[in-house]
Amino acid sequence: MSDFFSPGWSIFIAIVTIVGIIWCLWLLMSQRKTKVPTDSSGNVTDTGHVWDDDLRELNNPLPRWWMWMFIISCIFGAIYLVLYPGLGAYQGILGYSTQAEHDQSVQTANKDLQPVYAKYMQMSIEQVAADPKANEMGQRLFLNYCAQCHGSDAGGSKGFPNLHDKDYLYGGEPELIRTSIVQGRAGVMPAFRHLSSAQISEVVAYVRSLSNLPANDLRVAQGEAVYKSNCAACHGPDGKGNIILGAPNLTDRVWLYGSSEKAITETVQKGRNGVMPGHEAILTPEKIQILTAYVWGLSHQPMSTKK
């Protein structure tokens, strides 16, 4: 209720809520009858509604207990809205928030689990990756924080790297993986709109040839000059990439957005923006240690153990 883009909506919600409570009380009091209407014979009149031939709805007032329960409910609602959030952006006298409660529960859980994780802080990443229990914990952490992008099997998808191979944009060493998890990554491939259609076609052919994909020989020869003028600064003159910039190696057959002429042409024309969020604020150092080991281990398992 407090995440409003403008104060106007907050004020509107607060007014509607307060007016609604007041209206409910007014409606109750305005319909309250102090005297039961009777006919000339002294019998309570009915509303004219009859069911099953002889079941009449009498015109009796609401029971007193029901009326007081209704009033007490309205008073309770008003007191609740003063103490807790509910009136637009008003935080309440007690300052309660579900975010604060969540943060507190996370801190408590981290404190309770710290002894479980502590021993892994004294071990190398390679040792942690070889520990079966740490591997199980790392898998759970991965499913909670990484699987949404990289997939539950870490196989990745278009725009999201496969973590089973050793083709890391920013390097596959344990400390580089840790840096990716902690700080995140922001990869930018600029759009080359200044290139003509012919130049794009030529450089696409040349890039495909770097990984031995089929390409027109004439366009490959012409595309080399285009590549050196526009692409070599990031991907290197030999197309091997640059882990400092996150520029991919163009000489292997690992393609994040596809290796077809259409896919590479789209990349050159429109550019690409890949974002890996940092997890330093939500993961403890112990969890980062275990998750780093798990991710590193995905590409360093014996071939016989991979699924």
Image: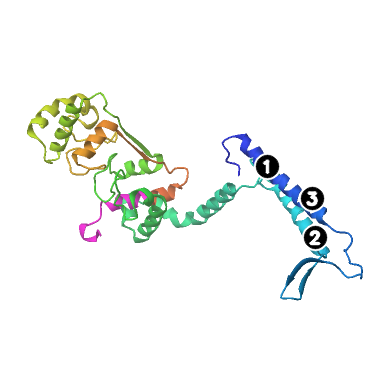
Crowding around mark 2 (Cα neighbors within 10 Å: few <14, some 14 to 19, many 20+) is some
Residue 108 is situated, as x and y percent measured from the top left of the image, at 55, 53
157 sits left or right of 254 in the view: right
Visible residue check, residue 122 = no
As helix, strand or loop, the secondary structure at mark 1 comes to helix
Residue behind mark 2: 67
Check disc 1 and report the residue beneath it.
14
- In depth, the one of 94 and 127 nearer the eye is 94
Q: Earlier in the sequence, mark 1 or mark 2?
A: 1
- Residue 279 lies, in percent from the top left, at 43, 44
Q: Could you tell me which quadrant the C terminus lies in? A: bottom left
Along the viewing direction, whichever of 176 and 91 lies nearer the viewer: 91
Q: Quadrant of the N terminus?
A: top right
**Identity of the residue drawn at 29% across and 29% down:** 191
Q: Which residues are magenta?
A: 291-307
Q: Cα distance, mark 3 to mark 1? A: 18 Å
